[in-house]
Image (cartoon, rainbow, N blue to C red):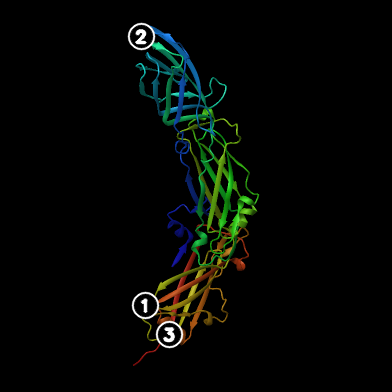
Amino acid sequence: TSLTLDQILKQNESDLINVDGDGFISLIYRSSLFSSTAEDLIIISDQSYIQTISPGLGPVPLPNGNTLNYAETQTLTFAVAPNQLDSIMLKGGSLDITANSGFDATLDIVITIPGATIGGIPFSQTINIAANSIDNSTFSLSNYKFDLTNGGTTTNEFQVVFDLTLTGNGGTINASDQLDIDLTISNLQFSKLFGVVDISNIAPQEDTVAITLFNSASGIGDFTIFNPEVRLYTENSFGTTIEASFNRMEGINTISGVTYDLSVSGSLPAPWTISGPTYSQMGQTIDDSLIINGNDIVDMINDQPKFFVYDIGASTPSAASQLFVLDTSSIKFDAEIELPMHGTIKNFTMIDTVGLDLGMDAVVNLTLSTRIRNGFPLEFDITFYSLEWDNVNKVYNLTDSAYADSNILVAESGSIDGNGRVTAKVETQTDIVMNETQTRNFANASKMIIKAVASTSNNGTTNVKFYNDYELEFKIGAIAEVLTEF
């Protein structure tokens, strides 16, 4: 049979393997994580206000049908700390008003919020209350823009104007008469926020990339990889640059217990400034990236991490940063680890098991003959074991004692040029001569275990590269001495 590296790659249905235009191979490990949208992360709580309006009029008799006017403006705080909002565009919400009149007169209240507008027209509603009674009213705030600067002087504040008209019914207005009014702004949903917005909880926190190369082999051995990279990609639609901090960026070998934390290595920016859309780009998503390479990445990969864990925090560049946030704003982090197949490997171990049903009762002695034409930059030392179904303790090494030199190479590496590329196959032929005991063990086997230990050329000291046109040709035959009876 023959096997090309291209055939192996075509069986891969994931995005793990990358082949460039020249056929050079890299292993790519990715993790994609979305944060929630700003609508999910930034919750605006209900706003409740209890106000008392005491005109201090009277005692004033108010004949039937006569009117008395009084206006008062109150400044209210929009409770969204630590955010400092200049304005908010609402796509949902309501204003619930409970008015308790202590006046012995019919009361008309015009409630105006100058900073809450639709198309430049302020919110204004009228409530009619009978003498000494209570009224409950609800008004929609959908599509209103709230200016929370109180005339451009501050943040998180707005004014409410109460314009009272008392219509007499023959009673008297006393100085102690008052209007108790409860305002509740509830079920607020925003489409846009402007100002200083706390976005410290937008980062995706911790995520993990599994590096399956270091989980798939029976033994990794020693190796080096040239120019590995960790790449982080972001998509940011928050209306600000974001400063990302690396709380953790660590390679973890769960078998050896070795960890390598890049966040304390000095190789990461502190902070990483992520680009965001400007006002003219509102609604757009800005892509950014960070490439981490160098000796620290090489050292981390050489520790053979089975997992790469990263934990990212985020904040605005300074406490006074002005930004905008849409309800759909989000930030996405992708992590990608690239391992170019360029370097050295020593004692990379692979094990496979095949079932056998040989029917070799008459065979006395057996010689297995292998011929391998190797177009890979790896040299292989292969050991065959036989295993009987009915006794797991009956495992026999079929090869070591059969060799004059137990470390004989079953397959020499292909010829390699100065750039680490295989230029020609190299053929190796090996005879495994079994004695009668070994032949019996092999004949009785229900399974054969094949253990291959691979190293790059010159016992793992030569740097090589892997390309998708590499090929391995394998032939095996047997010479059997058979006992015949006449």
Q: Secondary structure at mark 2?
A: loop
Residue 50 sits in quarter: top left
What's the CA distance linking mark 2 and mark 1? 115 Å
What's the CA distance linking mark 3 and mark 2? 123 Å
Q: Position of residue 35 (x, y in %)?
A: 48, 42
Mark 1 Cα shell of 10 Å, populated few (<14), some (14-19), many (≥20)? few
Count of residue discs: 3
Circles 3 and 2, Cβ within 8 Å, touching? The answer is no
Disc 2 target residue? 170
Q: Quadrant of the C terminus?
A: bottom left
Q: Residue at x 45, y 17 (%)?
A: 176
Residue 327 sits in quarter: top left
Q: Position of residue 75 (x, y in %)?
A: 51, 22
Q: State the residue in front, 165 or 290.
A: 165
Q: State the residue in front, 11 or 156.
A: 156
Tell me which numbered mark, 3 or 2, is placed earlier along the sequence: 2
Tell me which numbered mark, 1 or 3, is placed earlier along the sequence: 1
Q: Quadrant of the N terminus?
A: bottom left
Q: State the residue in front, 333 or 295.
A: 333
Disc 3 target residue? 440
Q: Which disc, if any, is residue 234?
A: none
